[in-house]
């Protein structure tokens, strides 16, 4: 990854041909092609996970690929937002769909439900979970009124 970007979390695409790293200090997602035979990662793309006009501290946290494989989600802690990207099935390249406010302070971690219909986001500094409905056709997130109070939420897991 780019020097000084601080790769934090890493996920493979649903088909295993591509991989994505969120950078903690770069405010970006770095995409790679993956060659299973050699284990090689080849840089493919660097794309911002924050709005172009954001001037604050860039502090990425989590990255996840939607169970359907068509979308990628990323959390931005100091911007208190979630970024949504479409994944091109043939190239693995990302296109920004939207950036939405996460509904709390310092969205440290989030998870997608196994069926892909829901995203639950944990906020470390506002002590809450927020729930978003996922549009399966567009990947867009719609906030719901469902929340929960939790002390210092730093991880979300779905029990299957």
Image: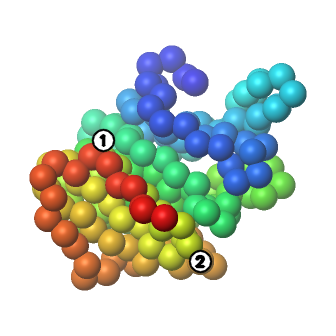
Residue under label 2:
136
Q: Is residue 26 visible?
A: no
The residue located at (50%, 56%) in the rendering is 73
- Classify 10 Å Cα crowding around label 2: few (below 14), some (14-19), many (20 and above): some
Where the N terminus falls, by quadrant? top right
Q: Disc 1 marks which residue?
A: 55
91, 130: nearer the viewer: 130
Q: Is residue 56 visible?
A: yes
Residue visible at 52% across and 52% down in the picture:
64
Residue occupying image coordinates x 48% and y 64%:
160
Q: Is residue 24 above or below residue 15?
A: above
Compared with 31, 90 (above or below) is: below
Number of the label disc, if any, that sits on residue 39: none
Q: Position of residue 104 (x, y in %)?
A: 21, 60
Is disc 1 placed on a helix, strand or loop?
loop
Q: Position of residue 70 (x, y in %)?
A: 67, 63
Residue occupying image coordinates x 70% and y 54%: 14
* Residue closest to the eye, 57 or 59: 59
The residue positioned farthest toward the right in the image shown? 37
Task: Check the image and name the residue furthest to the bottom.
Answer: 145
Determine whether the residue tagged by mark 2 lies in a helix, strand or loop: loop
């Amino acid at each position: 990854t780019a020097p000084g970007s601080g790769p934090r979390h890493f996920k493979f695409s649903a088909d295993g041909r591509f991989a994505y790293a969120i950078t903690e200090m770069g405010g970006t997602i770095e995409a790679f092609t993956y060659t299973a035979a050699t284990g090689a990662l080849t840089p493919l793309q660097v794309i911002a996970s924050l709005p172009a006009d954001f001037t604050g501290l860039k502090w990425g946290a989590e990255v996840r690929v939607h169970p359907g494989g068509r979308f990628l989600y990323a959390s931005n802690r100091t911007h208190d937002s979630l970024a949504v990207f479409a994944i091109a099935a043939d190239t693995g390249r990302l296109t920004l769909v939207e950036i939405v406010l996460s509904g709390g302070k310092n969205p440290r971690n989030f998870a997608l439900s196994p069926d892909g219909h829901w995203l639950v986001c944990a906020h470390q500094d506002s002590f809450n979970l927020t729930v978003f409905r996922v549009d399966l056709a567009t990947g867009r997130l719609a906030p719901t009124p469902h929340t929960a109070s939790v002390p210092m939420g730093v991880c979300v897991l779905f029990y299957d």
